[in-house]
Each structure stands twice: as structure tokens, then as C-alpha cells.
């Protein structure tokens, strides 16, 4: 039954086909370039059709219970969500994380529009289940899973939240210089940047870094056992609501002016990580892969990394 007091915000993102058309100006131009490169253009069209079929089915169901507003991912950083809005995300797992960090206490219903394309770890629902699901969510009869987030706060009060991970480092492919303070250790470092991962994100970027490091050590003769024993490298497997964050320094470079002893650790509620920038320019902090929404992190600025004071709410 339609309820005028209920508002849904449906978060979407462009399909790969739409991004190609945007890049090449027209559908036919996009088709020409892709087929010329030996790619299957029909695949992009099929995925596009599946996405919009799922989106339309979801919107039809929502329209029976309240008004809705569509919101493209590009406008998330500047959008003001209502306190009682119900958020429906239609897209891949990353879109859920991109959306959640901009919310306060609003619930997210995450819809997998294409099971053939996306694993859907964060997408528990399909379009055909939405009509039955919405009354339960509206009445508060559906379980909600809490998701721990990370938070970066700068000296000037600016802050940024992360659902999967924070990146602190250079905007381009150069070295990051900073002073790292953690667990009574303070050292000057030079690296490719620092990744701080939540429990949810521990199977993403952090896992990639860890697997790469372990893979390299296995190729180094007479080094593997002592390296693993000394650094206690175990792939973290944190719960989504774990009150811990994991940080890892990417490609640390020891020199006369930089050390690499404190390159991995667990941030807890009583054990924050602080970083002081030594980068005159191009130092940034961004989260969940959205490089366009960043905090400038220039020389002298300090960033305090802690478990966030709010959590995400995912309907399950």
C-alpha cells in the first residue's frame, strides 16, 4: 500500500555501455572502437539490458509502497539524505560501500541486478524479492547487520569515513613521505602509501596486498620461513562488525632518512594510528576507491585514524 510519508532513495551507477558511449560520444562510435579492438560489444549491450531490467523491476515494486528518487553514484558526496529515508542500492558490491559511508543511521537494501556478473557478497536480494521485502523493512521486522567503518580526522577538523578501506599517500605514482605513530612507535617512512582496512574490506585491497607480499617471499630462497616468523603475517579474516582495523604500508623503502619497522598493525578503540604528512603537494586521503572525493594531506597536517563513531546498517 502506498504511503506518502515513506521515501526511498534508489542509488544507481552507469553501466559499462553508458561509460563507453560517454567516452566515444555515440553508441555506433563505441561499437566501432570496441569491435576494432577485438572485443565483444554484444556483451556490453547484454549486461546493460540486464541491469535496466532489474532496475525497472525494483522501481515498480518500490512505487507501490512510497515515493522514490533516483540518485547516480556521481552525486553521492553532495547529496543530503533524509533521516528516515530508506536507501535501495542497485548495483555491484562496491556501490553499497560507496553509498554507506555517506549515511548516518539509514538502512540500506542492496539489490544484485546481475547474478551472472557480480558475486553479490553485499547484495543479499534480487529484484523479484523486493515487493515482499519492503513491508517487512517498513515495519522494522527485518534483521539489520551492523558494519564497522573507519574514520580519518585531520588537524583542521575535516573527516572522511570508509566502509572498506582508506588510502593515505600520493595522488600520483610517486613516493609518500610521512611520520607514522603507532603503539608507542614513531618513525619516518617513505612508501607508496598506507591502506587501512575494515573487517568488511579485509577480503579486498588488503587481501591483495598480503597475497602479493607472501607470493614474493615464497620466491626468495632461504628467506621465507624467517620472514614469516619475524613478521607473523597471517591473512586477516575480520568480521564485518569487528572493532578492529588493519593497516599495511605499501612498498616501504628503507633509507638514511626512512625506516620500515612498523609496516603492519591492528588499530583498536584504544590504539589509534596517527600520520603526519611530509608531502609538500599531492598528498591525499580517499576512501573506498573514490579518488575524486578526497582530503588534501599536505606537509604538517596530521591524520588520526580510528574506528568510526557510526556504523553502517545493511538489511539482510
Image (cartoon, grey):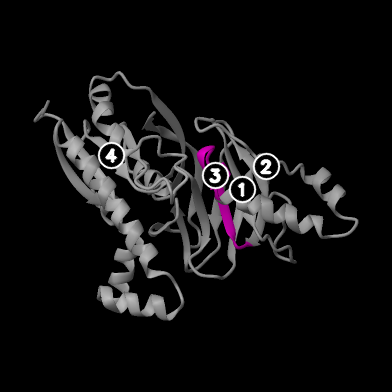
Q: Which residues are magenta?
A: 191-204
Rate crowding at label 4 as few (under 14), some (14 to 19) or many (20 or more) other CA atoms within 10 Å. many
Residue denoted by label 3: 197
Mark 3 and mark 4 in contact (Cβ < 8 Å)? Answer: no
Q: Residue at (59%, 49%) from the top-left corner? A: 206
Q: Is residue 78 left or right of residue 99?
A: left
Labels 2 and 3: the sequence-earlier one: 3
Labels 3 and 1: the sequence-earlier one: 3
Establish if 82 lies above or below 286.
above
Residue 84, located in which quarter of the rendered image? top left
Residue 294, located in which quarter of the rendered image? bottom left
Establish if 116 lies above or below 130.
below
Q: Is residue 80 visible?
A: no
Q: Magenta includes 198? A: yes
Mark 3 and mark 2 in contact (Cβ < 8 Å)? Answer: no
Q: Residue at (49%, 50%) from the top-left corner? A: 166
* Mark 2–mark 4 distance (CA, rounded to whole Å): 32 Å
Residue 88 numbered tag: 4
Mark 1 and mark 2 in contact (Cβ < 8 Å)? Answer: yes
Percent position (x, y) of residue 309? 42, 33
User: In this orientation, which residue lies closer to the viewer: 227 or 264?
Assistant: 227
Q: Magenta includes 301? A: no
Residue 207 numbered tag: 1
Amino acid at each position: 500500500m502506498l504511503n506518502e510519508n515513506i521515501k526511498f532513495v534508489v542509488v544507481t551507477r552507469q553501466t559499462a555501455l553508458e561509460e563507453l558511449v560517454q567516452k566515444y560520444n555515440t553508441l555506433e562510435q563505441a561499437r566501432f572502437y570496441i569491435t576494432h579492438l577485438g572485443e565483444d560489444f554484444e556483451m556490453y549491450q547484454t549486461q546493460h539490458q540486464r541491469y535496466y531490467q532489474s532496475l525497472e523491476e525494483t522501481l515498480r515494486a518500490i512505487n507501490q509502497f512510497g515515493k522514490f528518487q533516483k540518485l547516480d553514484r556521481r552525486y553521492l558526496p553532495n547529496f543530503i539524505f533524509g533521516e528516515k529515508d530508506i536507501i535501495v542500492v542497485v548495483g555491484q558490491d562496491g556501490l553499497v560501500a560507496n553509498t554507506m559511508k555517506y549515511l548516518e543511521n539509514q538502512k540500506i537494501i542492496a539489490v544484485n541486478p546481475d547474478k551472472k556478473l557480480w558475486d553479490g557478497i553485499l547484495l543479499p536480494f534480487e529484484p523479484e524479492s523486493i515487493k515482499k521485502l519492503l513491508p517487512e523493512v517498513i515495519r522494522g521486522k527485518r534483521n539489520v547487520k551492523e558494519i564497522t567503518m573507519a574514520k580519518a580526522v585531520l588537524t583542521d577538523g575535516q573527516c572522511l569515513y570508509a566502509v572498506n578501506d582508506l588510502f593515505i599517500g600520493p595522488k600520483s605514482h610517486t613516493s609518500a613521505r610521512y611520520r607514522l605513530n603507532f603503539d608507542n612507535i614513531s618513525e619516518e617512512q617513505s612508501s607508496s602509501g598506507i591502506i587501512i582496512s575494515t573487517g568488511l574490506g579485509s577480503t579486498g585491497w588488503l587481501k591483495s596486498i598480503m597475497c602479493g607480499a607472501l607470493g614474493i617471499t615464497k620466491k626468495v630462497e632461504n628467506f621465507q620461513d624467517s620472514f614469516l616468523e619475524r613478521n607473523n603475517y597471517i591473512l586477516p579474516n575480520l568480521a564485518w562488525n569487528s572493532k578492529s582495523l588493519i593497516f599495511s604500508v605499501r612498498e616501504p623503502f628503507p633509507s638514511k632518512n626512512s625506516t620500515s619497522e612498523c609496516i603492519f598493525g591492528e588499530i583498536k578503540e584504544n590504539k589509534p594510528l596517527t600520520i603526519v604528512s611530509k608531502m609538500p603537494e599531492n598528498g591525499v586521503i580517499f576512501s573506498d576507491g573514490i579518488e575524486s572525493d578526497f582530503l588534501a594531506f599536505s606537509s604538517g597536517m596530521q591524520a588520526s585514524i580510528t574506528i568510526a563513531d557510526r556504523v553502517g546498517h545493511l538489511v539482510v
